[in-house]
């Protein structure tokens, strides 16, 4: 097996008391693509945010355990976090261009790190825009605002911006979920091409994407590490039943629904109140399925239930107007 | 028609009339002031009034220039003092301070914004004016008449303005998305670089709007300024000189010197002028704002 690049040891994360990651220990191999898979809310983004310590921005989040990058403990007080972050490009779920021109977006990182010379910056901008296949499309309008680009182009620009500081690792949090199929394919191709020089960690909901890209797979479930290993092994012959279920897309069929309520036509806060009443009648660990069609309820009911300490297992759109929310009583 | 629809109709009409009323009021005031000011305008040409330095109502000389200059000095100074302080504290509150501190300080700042201006004026007379007279002016070797000066007006005014600016700016900074900050931090920028190049840039239209709002308040603020600024109708030559801003002129002399010919009309003109300046200022500011909003998307 190849070298370890990111070494995670007994890692825990708490959001003001709520434990989002439980005792994660895993090694992420160098110059390969590692996919972190698992259902919504299982802690994938949290794990990624810990790797470059963006978790620091979250009020009330605390971590314990170690994450070593090239053997350096990134949570150590003596570590200069900007150096660590410089080693890692980030590709977010939503393409997020900085509020400046296309050129400035790519030049942003190098500028921050002290490159002043125009000729040098020009070269960097061209190099990385070419690398992500955007140069031909934008070379005549480098000075126009980055927000004028299409969403797919913006995501490639973000990739170029991350690459421009010459990182060793690229962290991607569902980088294609906001993109059309063609743009997604573009990004996937880039990532495959980049892996010979970079260690890539990609969070994805899309099991097929994980199969197409990953060399190594980490499966999280409710904050726990269920399984990790070579993609070929995990996908073809998972050791854990939960992994098999997730891969087969049947993850929740084994979750017996104990009660189901239909709240279509209700608005908030009634949705919330009815859901609460329904949970009240259930035993601990019982599972409630709620159907709603009121948009606010889709975010507010799960949030409220989580605040009450229950476990939101899934929030999913099931048809044009309706969403299902699955909650486990705690 | 059922009663729900009727209610809907009535309430929308009611709101429309309220809006129309508020807008009309502005034009009624404008016309009223103009009507009252026209006698003096028909006798003395407007540029004589605006640019003459000679203010001797007894002799029938009504030069507004010292008041115009006084207004701009005091307001300008207030902004120069208030803007840096408010920006720094807004940045601190929204970017560095923890939730707890922010939640404690915010109500206090909002409270400052609600204190009646006469209280600020008193504080100016009791604290700022003596401070300038006894400490600041002697240290800097400047001359002052008892400390009542442009500087005193500027300081008092800036303290009245900065709660407004801080309060709005803090909100504006908080609307900048976390994603954007993460992007900047993730390429290895420090927090300060992120604030400087991304957060402030993204929120510059909002911050500008906050400053304009503060400025508008400063322009017309009367009571507190009037109490500390000295009220001498002369063009100040330094910030330690007294001045006589326009709102103070109106408040001080309206009703007192009405027996003088044209005086009433002159004061109305001053009010009209003040109204127009604030109007133009706001329109210009809005234009700049729209432009800025386009440039930071
Ligand atoms: N800022 C926060 N404050 C409190 N709890 C949070 C915060 N961010 C995430 N959580 C909680 O931590 C858990 C893990 O969240 P995380 O965002 O890591 O999940 P995820 O696997 O990325 O989900 P998704 O696939 O939906 O993006 C969830 O239960 C979530 O509600
Ligand atoms: Mg996520």
Image: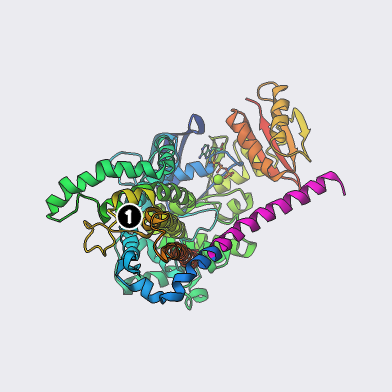
Q: Is residue B22 magenta?
A: yes
In x, y percent, where is residue B82? 33, 52
Q: Nearer the viewer, residue B240 or A77?
A: B240
Judged from the image, the secondary structure of the residue bearing numbered disc 1 is helix
**In the image, what residue occupies the spot 54% across and 63% down?**
B32
Q: Is residue A82 above or below residue A225?
A: below
Magenta span contains residue B251 = no
Is the stretch drawn in magenta largely helix, strand or loop?
Answer: helix
The answer to whether residue A152 is visible is yes
Q: Quadrant of residue A242?
A: top right
Residue drawn at (24%, 62%) of the image: B236
Residue range corresponding to the magenta coloring: B1-30
The residue beneath circle 1 is B78
Q: Is residue A320 visible?
A: no
B266 vs A156, left or right, is left
Q: How many marks?
A: 1
């Amino acid at each position: 097996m190849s070298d370890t690049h990111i070494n995670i040891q007994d890692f825990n994360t708490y959001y003001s008391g709520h434990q989002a990651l439980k005792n994660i220990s895993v090694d992420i191999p160098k110059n390969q693509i590692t996919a972190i898979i698992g259902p919504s809310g299982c802690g994938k983004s949290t794990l990624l945010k810990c790797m470059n310590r963006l978790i620091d921005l979250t009020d009330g989040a605390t971590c314990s355990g170690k994450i070593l990058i090239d053997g350096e403990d990134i949570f150590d007080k003596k570590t200069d976090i900007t150096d660590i972050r410089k080693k890692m490009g980030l590709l977010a779920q939503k393409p997020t261009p900085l509020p400046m021109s296309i050129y400035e977006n790519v030049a942003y990182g190098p500028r921050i790190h002290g490159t002043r010379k125009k000729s040098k910056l020009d070269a960097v901008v061209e190099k990385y825009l070419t690398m992500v296949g955007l140069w031909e499309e934008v070379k005549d309008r480098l000075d126009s605002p980055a927000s004028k680009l299409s969403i797919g182009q913006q995501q490639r620009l973000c990739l170029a911006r991350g690459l421009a500081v010459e990182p060793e690792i690229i962290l991607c949090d569902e980088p294609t979920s906001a993109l059309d199929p063609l743009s997604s394919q573009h990004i996937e191709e880039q990532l495959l091409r980049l892996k010979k020089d970079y260690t890539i960690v990609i969070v994805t909901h899309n099991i097929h994407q994980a199969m197409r890209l990953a060399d190594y797979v980490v499966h999280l479930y409710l904050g726990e590490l269920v399984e990790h290993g070579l993609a070929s092994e995990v996908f073809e012959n998972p050791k854990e039943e939960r992994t098999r279920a997730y891969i087969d897309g049947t993850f929740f069929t084994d979750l017996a629904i104990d009660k189901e309520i239909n709240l279509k036509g209700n608005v908030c806060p009634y949705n919330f109140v009815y859901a609460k009443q329904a949970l009240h009648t259930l035993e601990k660990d019982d599972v409630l399925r709620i159907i709603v069609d009121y948009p606010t309820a889709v975010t507010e009911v799960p949030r409220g239930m989580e605040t009450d300490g229950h476990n939101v297992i899934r929030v999913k759109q099931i048809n044009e107007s309706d969403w299902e929310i699955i909650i486990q009583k705690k | 028609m059922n009663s729900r629809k009727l209610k809907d109709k009535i309430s929308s009409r009611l709101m429309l009339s309220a809006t129309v009323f508020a807008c009309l009021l502005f034009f009624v005031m404008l016309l009223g002031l103009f009507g009252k000011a026209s006698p003096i305008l028909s006798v003395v040409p407007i540029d004589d009034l605006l640019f003459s330095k000679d203010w001797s109502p007894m002799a029938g000389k009504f030069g507004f220039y010292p008041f115009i200059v006084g207004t701009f000095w005091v307001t300008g100074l207030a902004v120069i003092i208030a803007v840096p302080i408010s920006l720094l504290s807004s940045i601190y509150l929204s970017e560095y301070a923890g939730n707890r501190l922010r939640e404690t300080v915010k109500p206090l700042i909002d409270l400052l914004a609600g204190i009646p201006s006469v209280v600020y004026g008193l504080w100016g007379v009791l604290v700022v004016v003596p401070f300038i007279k006894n400490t600041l002016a002697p240290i800097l070797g400047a001359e002052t008449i008892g400390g009542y000066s442009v500087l005193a007006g500027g300081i008092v005014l800036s303290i009245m303005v900065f709660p407004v600016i801080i309060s709005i700016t803090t909100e504006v900074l908080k609307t900048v998305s976390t994603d954007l900050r993460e992007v900047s931090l993730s390429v290895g920028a420090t927090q300060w670089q992120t604030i400087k190049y991304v957060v402030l840039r993204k929120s510059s239209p909002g911050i500008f709007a906050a400053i304009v709002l503060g400025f508008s308040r400063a322009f017309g603020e009367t009571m507190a300024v009037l109490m500390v600024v000295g009220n001498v109708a002369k063009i100040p030559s330094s910030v330690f000189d007294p001045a006589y801003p326009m709102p103070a002129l109106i408040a001080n002399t309206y009703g007192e010197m009405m027996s003088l010919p044209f005086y009433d009309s002159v004061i109305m003109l001053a009010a009209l002028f003040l109204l127009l300046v604030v109007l133009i200022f706001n329109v210009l500011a809005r234009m700049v704002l729209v432009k800025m909003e386009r440039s930071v998307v």
